[in-house]
């Protein structure tokens, strides 16, 4: 049986697993990643993969190929991890380095573009050649599939839609230099930033730590929203309107028949319902398959994406 190794490197965790051609996860193990540079990430991947091989091992034979999903800009054609963010830019030939170490062909891609590959191969891509995959989690980004092909752009930066303004005015500064980017309103880092900015303007029972590294709980915000907590109601209404506006803007760009939502922020369906209520039906009239939550397991979509990268689909 041919299998593929997937490595999903996120901001806080590293997931390694072995998959078959149909996207069935045969084995997997989770590791902590923590804050990293590109060079230190190689060490984290190597240490974790060595442990995986020793403690979990292969299902049968050595995997045919490995795929890695990474945050930041990635040149998948040349296997180069270009940057994590503007402050962490140190291009490295990660695919070659891993391939040389483990003697397994290696391919790499951006994490959301990898998840879009998973959606294209294992998910809604089975019924659509024109869809948008929007990942709303720690940050916000999107993957565009047009006529069956994934859009990447001239600098492999297509889909960074979190850094667009969507008509929801909070007055919050984004690290990219703009004000009121949707990522600073409707992602988990956005909920935290907005809660801190607005906490003195609205009454709230929400626990907000003085330590900026201790983010507010989005789950608590959703719970308090149901109890009509003024701050939490404001945060949820802003976020759902921002995401609805983002969807409507993107629909006008690529004319999809399907919009797929993924990521931890929307996977439980709470925000999805509120987003749907705010969509203008004329704007989305050609989205015949709807604005839907991915059918792929949100815990493993990154790993499935890394597997799809390994398969080069």
Image (cartoon, rainbow, N blue to C red):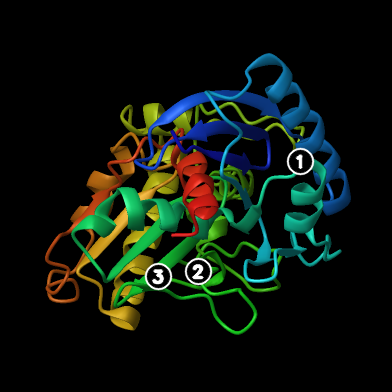
Viewer-side residue, 186 vs 3:
3
In this figure, which residue is indicated by the disc labeled 2? 161
Q: SS of the residue at dot 3?
A: strand
Element marked by disc 1: helix
Q: Are marks 1 and 2 in contact (CB under 8 Å)?
A: no
- Kindly state the secondary structure of the residue where label 2 is placed: helix
**In this figure, which residue is indicated by the disc labeled 1?**
102
Q: Name the one closer to the observer, 109 or 177.
A: 109
Q: In which quarter of the image is the C terminus?
A: bottom left
Q: Report the mark closest to the observer, 3 or 2.
A: 3
Residue 113 vertical placement versus 219 (above, below):
below
Question: Vertical placement of 138 versus 178: above or below?
Answer: above
Cα gap from disc 1 to disc 3, whole angstroms: 32 Å
Give the percent coordinates (x, y) of residue 82: 76, 67
Question: Residue 137, labelled with which disc?
Answer: none
Nearer the observer, disc 1 or disc 2?
1
């Amino acid at each position: 049986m041919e299998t593929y190794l997937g490595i999903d490197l996120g901001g806080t965790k590293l997931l390694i697993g072995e998959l078959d051609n149909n996207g069935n996860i045969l084995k997997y193990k989770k590791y902590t990643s923590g804050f990293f540079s590109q060079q230190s990430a190689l060490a984290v991947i190597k240490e974790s993969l060595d442990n995986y091989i020793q403690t979990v091992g292969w299902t049968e034979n050595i995997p045919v190929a490995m795929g890695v999903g990474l945050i930041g800009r990635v040149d998948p054609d040349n296997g180069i991890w270009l940057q994590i963010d503007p402050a962490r830019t140190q291009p490295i030939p990660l695919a070659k380095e891993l391939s040389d170490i483990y003697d397994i062909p290696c391919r790499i891609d951006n994490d959301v573009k990898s998840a879009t590959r998973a959606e294209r191969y294992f998910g809604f891509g089975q019924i659509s050649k024109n869809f948008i995959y929007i990942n709303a989690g720690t940050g916000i980004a999107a993957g565009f599939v047009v006529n069956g092909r994934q859009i990447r752009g001239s600098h492999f930066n297509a889909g960074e839609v979190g850094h667009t303004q969507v008509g929801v005015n909070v007055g919050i500064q984004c690290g990219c230099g703009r004000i009121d980017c949707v990522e600073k309103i409707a992602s988990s880092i956005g909920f935290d930033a907005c809660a801190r900015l607005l906490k003195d303007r609205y009454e709230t029972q929400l626990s907000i730590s003085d330590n900026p590294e201790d983010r507010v709980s989005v789950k608590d915000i959703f719970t308090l929203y149901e109890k009509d907590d003024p701050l939490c109601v404001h945060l949820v209404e802003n976020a759902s309107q921002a995401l609805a506006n983002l969807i409507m803007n993107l629909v006008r760009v690529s004319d999809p028949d399907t919009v797929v939502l993924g990521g931890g922020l929307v996977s439980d369906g709470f925000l999805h319902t509120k987003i749907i209520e705010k969509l203008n039906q004329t704007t989305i009239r050609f989205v015949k398959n709807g604005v839907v939550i991915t059918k792929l397991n949100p815990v493993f979509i990154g790993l499935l994406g890394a597997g799809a990268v390994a398969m080069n689909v």
